[in-house]
Image (cartoon, grey):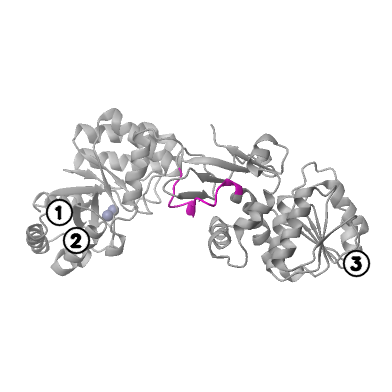
């Protein structure tokens, strides 16, 4: 594995620091490296490093020594050169790099983050045409890159003609997303352009950052590997707004799966950004249920001060079910459930819950008067009923997503009765990070109950996945991923 863009900073002249970098590379199975630092800098904010003959001489001496010490490593020396149109600077820097004697020169365009993207790309092109480079550093693909594909293609073409290698930079500053990577690899193939992978580490801890992951992604794309996601979970509440699904789980691999919390339009997920690893036993059945556990958890946790004992949960599907578990876990015991025609599996499920929590939660026959209503059906008539029956000072939590928009809440009702209403869709106000955290807790760290048992309760008489796959009227859709 290679990391062809590592800044040594003071390690340029301090051989012990340089050795630390090498040890770190060996730890990570990196056996080909390009150690470098910046030459002259355009911006006075940045400090030049490899810009005097003395420093460069010392650097090359040290490189020679470590090459001898680490014969199994392919160690290259380099300078990252700053491109500029300023003639005076350019002359100075071109002299610096051509006389340096280092193995490889990376050329990079810096300080144009606020420039028009077109100008930035043109600068890269001009750099390729006028600098004696071996590698083009961190070409950035901004959001609008698709409008400038003709320029990007020109850059790749010119690089190939001039035998300049294009760098695939893996730092957070310049890493291409999957779609961009796929596009660039296509261009590299078209023009027979070579590429290297570089972390652009600025300290020893950053060596190899995202490099292995980049190899994996490139591998998948080049080999046209099968799609990562096996199932995706679509909320019927959000699909209306154009969501194509925002949770999925990957195929099992070596006893593990990845749970993807973000949207995943791409063929391959970015396992290091929008997902985290879960054990294979947390398969789609668990996730389909625990998704609602998650919804309840993240919403109810933020409003527990509004939830008073003497609770009615309306609906005992996935949402009501997981909501009940969450309330029990948080010490609530005075809870009732209303649902139409209680089915056997629901009855059995509740029996088991009562056993595990030593509780006496019961089904009731009608929507009566309670302190807190948790609406988990999304049915407008049910919401209307609650508003009609409720007394003063109650809390109404709308966990279900109404589909039909046929019932409009009368603001006067809210005023007169002093009702507190909270809408609680799972996506509201929660970042991916927050969802990831809650989910992790649910799947891994929650010792209060055996998650598997709860899933098995729900599967007591029906196989959730098969049922859901057959029955698209369910609140959620779990779909086998096919595009
Ligand atoms: Zn740079
Ligand atoms: Zn750099």
Q: Position of residue 156 (x, y in %)?
A: 29, 35
Task: For label 2, count other residues whose C-alpha is less than 10 Å away and answer few (under 14), some (14-19) or many (20+).
Answer: many
Q: Is label 3 in contact with label 1 (beta carbons under 8 Å)?
A: no
Q: What residue did someone put label 3 on?
A: 392
Q: Position of residue 462 (x, y in %)?
A: 69, 44
Secondary structure under badge 3? Answer: loop
Q: What residue did someone put label 2 on?
A: 22
Secondary structure under badge 1? Answer: loop
Q: Position of residue 35 (x, y in %)?
A: 19, 56
Q: CA distance from mark 3 to mark 1?
A: 76 Å
> What residue range appears in magenta?
269-285
Q: Residue at x 24, y 51 (%)?
A: 3
Please indicate whether residue 72 sits to the left or right of residue 410 in the image: left
The answer to whether mark 1 is within 8 Å of ligand 2 is: no
Q: What residue did someone put label 1 on?
A: 73
Q: Could you tell which of marks 2 and 3 lies nearer the N-terminus?
A: 2
Task: For label 3, count other residues whose C-alpha is less than 10 Å away and answer few (under 14), some (14-19) or many (20+).
Answer: some
Q: Is label 1 in contact with label 2 (beta carbons under 8 Å)?
A: yes
Secondary structure under badge 2? Answer: helix
Q: Nearer the viewer, residue 346 or 16?
A: 346
Quarter of the image for residue 222 reads: top left
């Amino acid at each position: 594995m290679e990391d062809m863009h590592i800044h040594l900073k003071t390690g340029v002249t301090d051989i012990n620091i340089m050795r630390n970098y090498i040890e770190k590379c060996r730890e990570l199975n990196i056996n080909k490296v390009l150690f470098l630092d910046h030459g002259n800098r355009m911006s006075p904010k940045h400090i030049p490093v490899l810009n005097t003959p003395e420093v460069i001489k010392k650097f090359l001496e040290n490189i020679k020594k470590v090459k001898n010490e680490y014969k199994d490593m392919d160690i290259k020396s380099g300078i990252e050169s700053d491109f500029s149109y300023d003639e005076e600077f350019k002359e100075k820097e071109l002299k610096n790099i051509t006389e340096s004697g280092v193995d490889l020169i990376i050329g990079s365009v810096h300080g144009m983050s606020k420039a028009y993207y077109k100008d930035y790309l043109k600068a890269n092109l001009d750099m390729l045409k006028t600098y004696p480079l071996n590698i083009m550093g961190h070409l950035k693909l901004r959001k609008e890159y698709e409008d400038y594909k003709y320029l990007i293609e020109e850059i790749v073409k010119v690089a190939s003609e001039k035998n300049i290698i294009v760098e695939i930079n893996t730092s957070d500053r310049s890493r291409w997303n999957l779609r961009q990577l796929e596009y660039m690899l296509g261009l590299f193939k078209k023009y027979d352009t070579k590429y290297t992978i570089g972390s652009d580490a600025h300290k020893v801890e950053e060596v190899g950052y995202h490099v292995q992951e980049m190899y994996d992604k490139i591998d998948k794309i080049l080999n046209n590997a099968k799609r990562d996601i096996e199932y995706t979970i679509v909320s019927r509440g959000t699909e209306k707004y154009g969501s194509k699904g925002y949770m999925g789980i990957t195929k099992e691999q070596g006893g593990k799966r990845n749970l993807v919390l973000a949207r995943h339009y791409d063929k391959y997920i970015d396992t290091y950004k929008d997902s985290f690893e879960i054990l294979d036993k947390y398969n789609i059945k668990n996730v389909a249920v625990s998704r609602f556990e998650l919804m309840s958890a993240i919403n109810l946790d933020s409003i527990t001060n509004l939830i008073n004992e003497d609770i009615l949960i309306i609906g005992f599907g996935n949402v009501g079910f997981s909501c009940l578990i969450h309330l029990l876990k948080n010490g609530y015991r005075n809870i009732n459930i209303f649902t139409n025609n209680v089915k056997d599996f629901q009855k059995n499920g509740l029996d088991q819950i009562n056993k595990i929590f030593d509780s006496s939660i019961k089904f009731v026959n009608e929507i009566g008067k309670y302190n807190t209503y948790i609406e988990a059906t999304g049915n407008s008539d049910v919401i209307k009923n609650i508003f009609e029956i409720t007394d003063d000072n109650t809390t109404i939590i709308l966990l279900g997503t109404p589909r039909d928009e046929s019932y409009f809440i009368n603001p006067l009702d809210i005023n007169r009765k002093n009702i507190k209403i909270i809408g609680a869709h799972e996506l509201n106000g929660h970042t991916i990070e927050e969802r990831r955290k809650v989910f992790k807790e649910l799947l891994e760290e929650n010792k209060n109950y055996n998650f598997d048992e709860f899933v098995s309760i729900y599967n007591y008489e029906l196989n959730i996945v098969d049922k859901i796959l057959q029955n698209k009227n369910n609140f959620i859709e779990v779909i086998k991923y096919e595009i």
